[in-house]
Amino acid sequence: MNILITGAVNGANEESKQLYQSIIDACEAYSNSISSPLDTMQFKGTNEERYKKAMELLKTAELIIAEMSIPSTGQGMELQEAVNRNIPIIIIAKEGSKISGLLLGTQKIIEMIYYKNKKELEEKLSMSLKKIHYNN
């Protein structure tokens, strides 16, 4: 399964980077291809190249995992494209985060995961991915 992890890049700090790595770690047992905001942070292309790369990744994605604790308009664009392409979405966010009602109105969200810390996130996400894996 090809997994695309989305999340804030411009507002990312060291804690965000560690969180993205935890999400990647939880996905590794269930995916042969994982793309994440960490890849985007390392990409040195132009804005146009960045957009093109994001849209290319969406063409092969079979699942989107959206970390939404920090608002990001670029992530919103990716998620709209995922909805257009009929790609299922798992939303993850720290407890207390506000998730857009517009996004919550889509029919592509297959799971909402709120977490208190990285350990809880990894456990909940692993359970969700295991359930998806065994249902396919």
Image: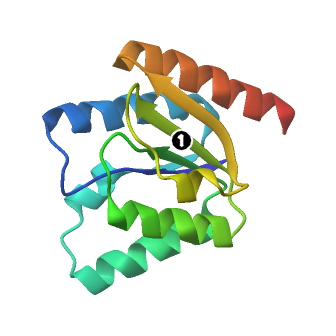
Q: Residue at x 44, y 29 (%)?
A: 25
Above or below, 51 relative to 94: below
Q: Of helix, strand and loop, which one carries label 1? A: strand
Category of crowding for the residue at label 1, using alpha-carbon neighbours closer than 10 angstroms: few (below 14), some (14–19), many (at least 20): many
Above or below, 85 relative to 30: below
Q: Residue at x 31, y 31 (%)?
A: 19
Q: Which residue is mark 1?
A: 91
**Residue located farthest toward the right when viewing the structure as drawn:** 135
Q: Residue at x 66, y 72 (%)?
A: 84
Left-right relation of 106 to 45: right
Question: What is the quadrant of residue 129 in the picture?
Answer: top right
Q: Position of residue 20 (x, y in %)?
A: 34, 38
Q: Position of residue 124 (x, y in %)?
A: 56, 20
**Residue located farthest toward the bottom when viewing the structure as drawn:** 48
Which residue type carries mark 1?
A: Ile
Left-right relation of 60 to 39: right
Colouring method of the image: rainbow
Left-right relation of 58 to 49: right
